[in-house]
Amino acid sequence: MFSGFMVNAWIVATLVALVGAAVGFFVVMRGSAFVAHAIPNGSFAGAAGASLIAVNTILGLGIFSLVGALGIALLGRRGRHDVATALTLVFMLGLGALFLSFSSPYAPEIYSLLFGEVLGISTSQLWPTIALTLVCLTVLAILWRPLLLASVLPSSARGLDPFKIELCFLLLVALATTMTVPVVGTALIFSLMIGPAAAARSFTVRPHVALALAVAIALATVWTAIASSYSTNLPVGFFVGVLSACAYTVGRLWSWARRRGASGRSGAAVGRRSATAAA
Amino acid sequence: MSHLLHTLIEPGFFSSSPARLAIAIGGPVAIVAAVVGVFTVIRGQAFAGEALGDIGATGGASAYLAGVGAIWGFVGISVAAAGVMEAIGVQRVRGRDVATGIVLGAGFGLAALFLYLGTTYENTSGATVTILFGSIFALNPSDLPLVLGFGAGVLVAMTMLYRPLLLASISPELAAARGVPVRLIGAAYLISMAVAVALSALTIGAILSTALLVGPAAAALRLTARPGRAIAAAATIGVLSTMLGILLSYDSYDWAASPHAWPASFFIVTVVLLLYLASGWLRPRGQTRSQ
């Protein structure tokens, strides 16, 4: 399990968990789960198109993720945000259907695109992935404070144009999508973004702690998914979807149990205690 | 003149029985989806609709595994998913988008599993593509009575739900004060939406089904604020998109770039998007931007 092509998978999976959880932290905070679902699924068309003209898949993913992000931002300006997201998503998926119909019958390709493939990471993809990880983390570090402020107090963030913030955030999701899709697949990468981050936020409200916890949970999720997929041959995406749901459920149960136990006592005191305990 | 007509409508279109069946099924599906979709847009539940549609893929794959008609799988699983979502109160928690997404992730993860178990990888025109992207020219004639039956059921439900749903969607507090069982209405609506996207999944595929649900409705609501008119407009736009999509797909058989016709679902979704964009330009003055 730890030799040959699998080494690439483990490296990429670790980077995927890192970036996925970090971006996911803001996805959850901003209530943008739909967007996190839409952009990767939309990028599917790009990957299908890229393999059609024999171009590197990552390029196709990248371009279509960006197009999707821009589409959602621009359409969302003039209309309802959830409608904009839905229509951008289905249009791009429709394009994906079109590109697929042009290509020679290669169903294993779409299947890996959608649901991930443990053995599909070639060494030539390794360096672009590492580069994109660094770019994503740098952008995230730069945007950390403005994003945090704008996400928590959208109306009072001074000097911060909400549209620009939203656009930067969407582009960040697009970037993250480009590098995280190959292992987990377009269909379920968003689970990796929202599950661990949501679970982490159930355990602590402190941003840095939540971020670290989200990364830890995401690493556990994706490593387990890769190992399981390698052993059972079942798709990585399946394990990611199910494990993320488990993480989320544990987080919710914890919150619920804490609220039950805190009845009659000040919520703030319990919050502080739990945050300290979780730190 | 007849040459122009022939260019627009390839000869044989109206006598082709797959095309006729596509029209016969596509029309009612578009109407049902549009009617339900108006409320989806008003209630801001597009993501829930998307989730139900995607989870429908699991149903399609299960039906394929079990050897039964896809429509049973789509409807069965979508309704079950709606039930689960309602039972765990997905729509009522804070952070309902994450809850919806988690359910979607788990449900669609199962689709990955079932598709893996059920299909061979050999051909692109296999079950995977049909379930996900639809295959409107390959429908079974026995689907027609089922579609009409389920569709009629949804329309009846929507007729009964209309007034309380409208009130509960626009102002839940006022509705509750007037004795409307808001939660129950919401649950009944979620199940109607599940059937509507399941029917759409049959024509344009599980992961594209939201297009018919949300697109025509959103376009209609940009053109008029009155619900009754919006529903009529949405149904018209939905049927128009479907028919045009079917026609274009049929015509595209002879176009270059592909040995076979371009997928109808691609055309239908693209026309829906174009009409939505057009509705933005045609928007009557004085309409609030939030529509």
Image (spheres, grey):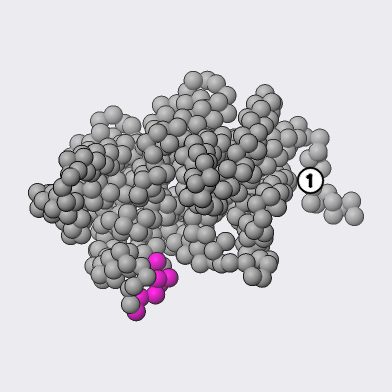
> For the residue labelled by badge 1, is the local secondary structure a helix, a strand or a loop?
loop
The residue at the point 20 percent across, 55 percent down is A205
Say whether residue A156 is left or right of residue A92: left
Q: Residue furthest right?
A: B1
Which is nearer the eye, A118 or A175? A175
Q: Residue furthest top?
A: B67
Say whether residue A218 is left or right of residue B268: left
**Residue B271's x, y, as percent?**
65, 53
**Residue A176's x, y, as percent?**
33, 58
Q: Which residue is mark 1?
A: B10
The residue at the point 58 percent across, 43 percent down is B164
Which is nearer the eye, A86 or B149? B149
Secondary structure of the magenta portion, mostly? Answer: helix
B119 up-or-down from A118: above or below = above
Identify the image quadrant of the N terminus of chain A: top left
Tell me which segment is drawn in magenta.
Answer: A159-166
**Residue B146's x, y, as percent?**
65, 26
Say if the magenta span includes residue B82.
Answer: no
